[in-house]
Image (cartoon, rainbow, N blue to C red):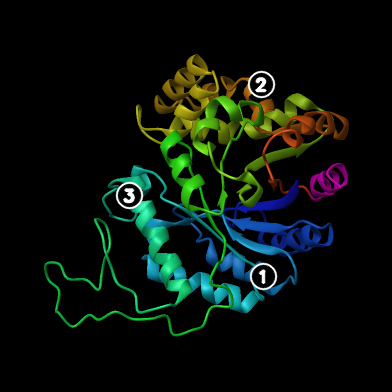
Amino acid sequence: MRLGINLGYFGAAAPDAFVPLVQRAEALGYDSVWTAEAYGSDAITPLIWAGAHTSRIKLGTGIMQMPARTPANTAMTAATIDLLSGGRMLLGLGLSGPQVVEGWHGEAYGKPLAKTREYVEIVREILRREKPLEHHGEHYDIPFTGEGATGLGKPLKLIVHPLRADIPIYLASIGPKNVALTAEIADGWLPLYFAPQRFATAFGDAFAGRDLSSFDIAPSVPVVLGDDVDACRSAVKPALALYVGGMGARGKNFYNDLVCRYGYEADAKQIQDLYLDGKRAEAIAAVPDALVDEVALCGPKERIRDLLATWEESPVTTMIVGSGQPEALEVMAELTA
């Protein structure tokens, strides 16, 4: 099981700790570093900054939001980073949710499965550079021929020659159909709040027939090192409460649905009701310890070592460590060596 480090949103930690943390991870043998975006910092700028201060560690976007960029712009960015870094780019993509897609990017959420399939097809075609790009689908029309078109658009081919035409593409997905699509068209999967012991029941059908030896399952896993297990769990619960309770509306929260599939239906409903009613402290307190222990690694080194056994027996091939503690990075490197 390889290790990655999840930096999350830039600015979540002290900016002056950003580069040393990545450099320490690289020195410890971490395979990849991942950056995120929502509606604050973008994922690309910090990733390039990390790449400029390292030499080996792979550079992953976890994730670039598809509604924020045309497929052509994403392909251009991926090819450029790959060239600048000497072939270290890992292209993580995600559609995000309706609140961000429509509320921030001003686009219709649309049909996520069809939109994702088209997007990935276009990116791959651009990177292969076999012919000028032409794609006429339900969501993307290139060259554009719809209402308002000048008629002057013509198929174009990427000017720069990519270092790799097969830059690995990862998808962030949660729902069963989206995960099945990821298994079909992507090179890797970026699940959030992944519970390894629930893989077979929550996700197993999505990977039926997929050769996992050529597929990277790379969950982001919160890791909090400390002697007080309850205090360590408490560091994880606010984000869990936010995602399960507030990352979407009632009936349209993918993370709430995920926790329900894990068997925490009553807890998920309580967390959401409290969070959406503005009772955030109560929502955080309602997050079960057992759920935290399924999706995170909390406590002293010996406890984390014991919890790791479940992860090592699972299909996970890359564990993306979510921690700003240099000592946690060191412990994880030691325990997975």
Separation of marks 2 and 3 at Cα, in angstroms: 37 Å
Residue on which disc 1 sits: 51
Q: From the viewer's perspective, is 141 left or right of 87? A: left
Residue displayed at 39% across by 35% down: 248
Under circle 1, the secondary element is helix
Residue on which disc 2 sits: 289
Three-letter amino acid code of the residue under disc 2: Asp
Separation of marks 2 and 1 at Cα, in angstroms: 37 Å
Three-letter amino acid code of the residue under disc 1: Gly
Q: Which mark is residue 321?
A: none
- Quadrant in the picture for residue 125: bottom left
* Magenta-tinted stretch: 326-337
Determine the residue located farthest toward the bottom in the rendered image.
159
- Quadrant in the picture for residue 111: top left
- In the rendering, at what x and y percent does residue 214 appear? 63, 52
- Vertical placement of residue 232 versus 220, above or below: above
Under circle 2, the secondary element is helix
Give yes or no for residue 37 being in the magenta stretch: no
Q: Are marks 2 and 3 in contact (CB under 8 Å)?
A: no
Give yes or no for residue 332 being in the magenta stretch: yes
Q: Which mark is residue 114?
A: 3
Three-letter amino acid code of the residue under disc 3: Ala
Crowding around mark 2 (Cα neighbors within 10 Å: few <14, some 14 to 19, many 20+) is some
The mark tally for this picture is 3
Q: From the viewer's perspective, is 59 left or right of 256? A: right
- Vertical placement of residue 166 versus 271, above or below: below
Determine the residue located farthest toward the front in the rendered image.
209
What secondary structure prevails in the magenta region? helix
Separation of marks 3 and 1 at Cα, in angstroms: 33 Å
- Sequence-wise, the earlier of marks 2 and 1 is 1
Q: From the viewer's perspective, is 322 left or right of 327? A: left
Residue displayed at 55% across by 31% down: 204
